[in-house]
């Protein structure tokens, strides 16, 4: 049984965006990295797509990252104040909103790195 979330059944795809990030650390076993968004200076975790060679992603470097954002379909533990944010999937939220919401509900938001390049 896979430990990776099933994006088709458990998660709502929200958007794809590009951001400047700095990679702080990476874990090749679980294919995740801790990054800092350059614009907001907020850290968050990002999953690394299987199509990416993690050897090319170096800690301490800045990258222009293209990633997909998903929100959990399971919103039963969400504060009523935030229900629309998670439940209304046809609204185009700013990427900053997802990064900030990650700090409140880290298990309800997933970022998946699909491409990156040095700026």
Image (cartoon, rainbow, N blue to C red):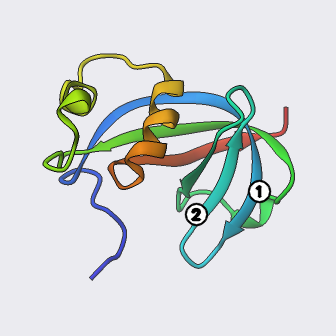
Give me the residue at 58% from left, 63% from top: 32
Give me the residue at 56% from left, 52% from top: 46
Quadrant of the image containing the C terminus: top right
Q: CA distance from mark 2 to mark 1?
A: 11 Å
Q: Which quadrant holds residue 19?
A: top right
Element class at badge 2: strand
User: Badge 1 local density, few (<14 within 10 Å), some, or many (20+)?
Assistant: some
Give me the residue at 13% from left, 48% from top: 76
On the image, the x and y values in percent for residue 14 come to 34, 31
Q: Residue furthest left?
A: 76
On the image, the x and y values in percent for residue 40 come to 67, 28
The residue identified by callout 2 is 32
Quadrant of the image containing the N terminus: bottom left
Give me the residue at 56% from left, 54% from top: 45
The residue identified by callout 1 is 24
Residue nearer the viewer, 67 or 87: 87
């Amino acid at each position: 049984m896979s430990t990776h979330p099933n994006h088709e059944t458990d998660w709502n795809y929200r958007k794809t965006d590009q951001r400047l990030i700095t990679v702080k650390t990476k874990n090749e076993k679980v294919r995740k990295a801790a990054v800092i968004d350059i614009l907001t200076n907020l850290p968050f975790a990002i999953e690394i797509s299987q199509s990416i060679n993690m050897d090319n992603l170096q800690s301490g470097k800045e990258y222009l990252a293209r990633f997909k954002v998903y929100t959990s379909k399971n919103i039963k533990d969400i504060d009523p104040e935030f229900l629309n944010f998670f439940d209304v999937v046809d609204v185009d939220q700013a990427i900053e909103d997802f990064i900030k919401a990650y700090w409140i509900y880290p298990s309800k938001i997933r970022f998946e790195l699909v491409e990156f390049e040095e700026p």
